[in-house]
Image: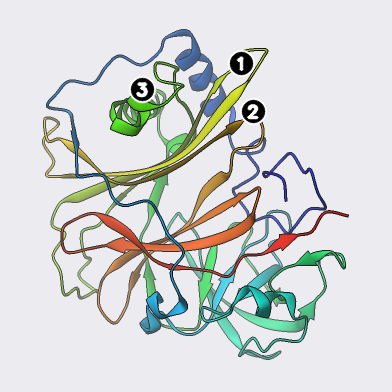
Amino acid sequence: MGRVGVQITPPVHRIRGQHHSLLPLVTLASLAACAREQPPKAPRVDSVVQAPAPPPPVVVDWRGWDERVGGLLAVAPEDDPDLAFLVRPDATTADVADSVWHTRVSAGDSVELFALDGSRHRVQIVALPVTTGGAACEEWPAARISNAPRSWGVGFVLDRAHPVPAVAVESLRGTDSSAAVSLAARIAQATPAARASGLAGMPFIVERLHRASLAVSSTEQAAQSFGDTTIIAATLFRRLAQEADPREERWFVLAERTGRAKSAPWVVRYLEYDDAPEDEADAMALLGLVRVRASGQPAMLIARDGRDGLVLKWIAPARDGAWRVTWTSARARCRAR
């Protein structure tokens, strides 16, 4: 399938938050314009520290799934909050192509939905399955749900995870918002991958940016302490609009800082990106940030949608501090006519 927003083949279902033409709000659009006019300055050496580059994300089998969050993952579509795509962690691509594969839930079952702002909502499945794609599409089964919130990203079976509130940059005041966008662009620009790219020197434009604290609340328990650790998760892009070969890169960057001092360095803990002809690079999006109830371990669900279809990735911090992909979903996609 084509990248999100520019469909080249029949559209597979889109995940909320990935259609880049809908992502930047007024605040982000104005800040992006400023970023184009004033390319970010090189960061101070003490402001951004590069952790050892994580290995390229690879497809892993379903055994990397954290079974403590249950055997079902619900994901919000882009344009219908009353619909949920149901992803079975152990499903294969062949299962996705099978229209009658078992989803382990039935009408009347309840699931818990999480939004990036930290809210959680218990809803009920009222109809299953719901057809959403054409005959050429291999996509996850869908269910109609009741009383769904307007904005949610990921869901689980009941009482398996705690939401970790993430503040969106557009909700910040003007100066704070501008500073956050500038910081995210500088962090991406300072990575070895950015400097080695054919688009080195081109400014990054921030599409989505969230900031969150990993400190454990008084109602939670964690096997690992994260202290005063703050993370930022950003989706960015940059383009080289040359007539002969226009190029585009799309990035997802996760960085963290320990301590409240402004001088504390930001450390890049995870990144992935795609370089392709303009309008063909894979889109990436953060769908959920949670803490596994049984362990207190934080984890993220991110989506990558592009030329080869749509996959979900579960990433979590490893012992060395880097965040790594531990599970990758079956691929959903549409075949060309």
Q: Nearer the viewer, mark 3 or mark 2?
A: 2
Q: Amino acid at mark 1?
A: Ala
Which of pointers 3 and 2 lies earlier in the amino acid sequence? 3
Image: 242 above or below 97: above
Asked whether the beta carbons under mark 2 and mark 1 sit within 8 Å of each other, the answer is yes
Q: Nearer the viewer, mark 1 or mark 3?
A: 1
- Tell me residue 316's x, y (percent): 31, 63
Image: 270 above or below 248: below
The residue drawn where x is 36% and y is 83% is 68
- Compute the Cα span from label 3 to label 2: 32 Å
Q: Is residue 284 left or right of residue 39?
A: right
Residue 185 seen in render: no
In the foreground, 91 or 165: 91
Check disc 3 and report the residue beneath it: 175
Q: Is residue 270 left or right of residue 204?
A: left
Check disc 2 and report the residue beneath it: 278
Q: Is residue 55 left or right of residue 289?
A: left
Q: Amino acid at mark 3?
A: Thr
Q: Amino acid at mark 2?
A: Glu
Q: Residues within 10 Å of mark 2 (few under 14, many from 20)?
A: some
Check disc 1 and report the residue beneath it: 241
- Compute the Cα span from label 1 to label 3: 30 Å
The residue drawn where x is 58% and y is 25% is 247
